Image: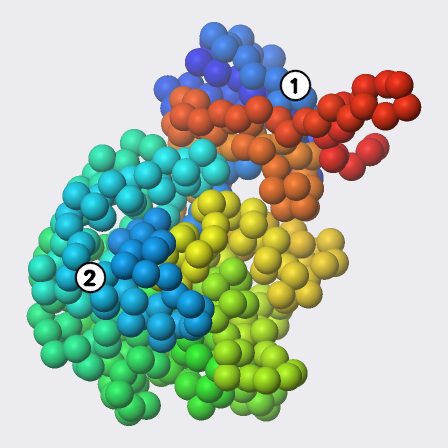
């Protein structure tokens, strides 16, 4: 048997070492130690980590790389960010949105990201971002999977044409129903928006991903309605709550009732550590709340928890290079998940858990799955996070679509030159 490609001596995320992966016609055809298979091309991983791609389950492609347009967010708050986005919207063009998002996608591919779920603001009656990003989704499909969420940024009930626009956006091909209940005018309106949007998604057979309770207000409890509606509509496994930061500020008794409800509903929780640590706690003096949702407690209860990047150089966040390892690193710091199991779980939050939140059915290293793979300059997932390790090779359906040199420095000390690689000595 001769296959197209054989990757030798890989270390897998689950700790298996010296594993060969055979790929033919873009698909994984065999996995095992020292496979006796001929290949047209052989890549020696040399014991480095090989995983399925990183996944960003929460991003805003329509605002990405717009930093400074028309001005910077000096307070750094969520509300100034939303106001700033409102100032930018009238000046947007399809071409500008497309070009910025396309540039970001090239960064994403270089960073080993295989899929992005992007929220798309539909509270612009021209729906320029919908047009731009559906075209980009098609162009990028061979290289990166893009899911688009119809996101009523200004409120589904609060913005008068949101319902009409959301229906138009879904007709134009958006994949997922979004929402922002904590931004509606009242708690009642927020809960009503959740019920409206869940009914709409259930009727159309669509997945749901709502910005939910992105607030420090412990009374912001829309996740409860979202979970209950998920059960009522039988949509377990197809719904995500993004942010859920109010859970950080709720009292422990209420959290002890709510977290099992989220688990029962099979609702994924998508935290955004880079953004939550900068946007939350803004009304506090000291002590200042971290604001990220209760990641280890949700995981312990069996909830699928993913981490998203959320923003890259836009009205809400001035930094970032779309590196999901940076996201995992921030998540483990904020959640204080520095034990071995905790750090590995944070790698899962930007890989397998994020894929589950997006409903990606062909994700993972297994026979019969597409050969979407990343070879890291690291020996295991924890080292990958620690080093934000170079993505030496990024493969899509068995083809190399990005490569980067390993990180090495030459140090001249005491009359000798030594190469430093920052790797854990064995
Ligand atoms: Fe977001």
Q: How crowded is mark 2: few (under 14 residues within 10 Å), some or many (20 or more)?
A: some
Residue 237: tell me if it is visible.
no
The one nearer the camera, 189 or 195, is: 189
Q: Which mark is residue 89?
A: 2
144 vs 379, left or right, is: left
- In terms of image quadrants, where is residue 400? top left
Q: Residue 346 carries which label?
A: none
Secondary structure of residue under mark 2: helix
Q: Which residue is drawn at 54% across and 67% down?
A: 277
Secondary structure of residue under mark 1: loop
Q: Which of marks 1 and 2 is in front?
A: 2
Q: Where is residue 167 in the image (x, y as percent from the top left)?
A: 11, 65
Disc 1 Cβ-to-ligand 1 distance below 8 Å: no
The one nearer the camera, 233 or 46, is: 46
Q: Residue 34 carries which label?
A: 1
12 vs 360, left or right, is: right
Q: How is the image coloured?
A: rainbow
425 vs 238, left or right, is: right
């Amino acid at each position: 048997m001769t296959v197209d490609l054989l990757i030798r001596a890989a270390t897998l995320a689950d700790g298996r070492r010296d594993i060969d992966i055979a790929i033919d016609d873009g698909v994984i055809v065999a996995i095992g130690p020292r496979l006796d298979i001929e290949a047209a091309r052989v890549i020696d991983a040399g014991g480095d980590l090989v995983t399925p791609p990183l996944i960003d389950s929460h991003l805003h492609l329509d605002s990405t790389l717009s930093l400074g347009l028309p001005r910077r967010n000096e307070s750094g708050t969520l509300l100034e960010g939303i106001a700033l986005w409102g100032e930018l919207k009238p000046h947007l063009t399809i071409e500008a949105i497309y070009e910025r998002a396309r540039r970001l996608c090239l960064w994403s591919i270089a960073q080993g990201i295989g899929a992005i779920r992007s929220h798309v603001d539909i509270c612009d009656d021209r729906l320029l971002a919908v047009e731009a990003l559906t075209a980009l989704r098609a162009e990028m499909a061979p290289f990166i999977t893009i899911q688009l969420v119809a996101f009523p940024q200004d409120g589904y009930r609060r913005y008068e044409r949101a319902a009409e626009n959301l229906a138009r956006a879904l007709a134009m091909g958006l994949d997922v129903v979004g929402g922002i209940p904590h931004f509606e005018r009242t708690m009642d309106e927020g809960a009503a928006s959740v019920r409206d949007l869940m009914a709409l998604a259930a009727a159309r057979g669509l997945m749901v991903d709502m910005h939910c309770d992105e607030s420090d207000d412990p009374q912001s409890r829309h996740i409860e309605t979202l979970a209950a509606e998920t059960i009522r509509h039988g949509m377990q496994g197809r719904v995500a709550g993004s942010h859920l930061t109010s859970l950080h500020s709720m009292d422990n008794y209420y959290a002890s009732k709510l977290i099992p409800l989220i688990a029962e509903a099979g609702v994924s929780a998508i935290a955004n550590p880079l953004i939550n640590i900068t946007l939350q706690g803004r009304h506090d003096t000291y002590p200042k709340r971290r604001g990220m949702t209760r990641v280890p407690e949700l995981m312990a209860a069996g909830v699928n928890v993913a981490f998203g990047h959320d923003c890259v150089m836009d009205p809400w966040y001035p930094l970032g290079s779309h590196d999901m390892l940076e996201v995992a690193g921030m998540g483990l710091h904020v959640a204080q998940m520095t034990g071995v199991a905790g750090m590995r779980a944070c790698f899962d939050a930007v890989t397998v858990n994020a894929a589950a939140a997006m409903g990606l059915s062909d994700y993972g290293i297994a026979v019969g799955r597409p050969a979407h793979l990343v070879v890291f300059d690291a020996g295991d997932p924890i080292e990958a996070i620690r080093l934000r390790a170079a993505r030496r090779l990024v493969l899509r359906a068995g083809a190399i679509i990005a490569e980067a040199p390993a990180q090495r420095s030459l140090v001249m000390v005491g009359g000798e030159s030594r190469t430093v690689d920052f790797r854990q000595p064995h």
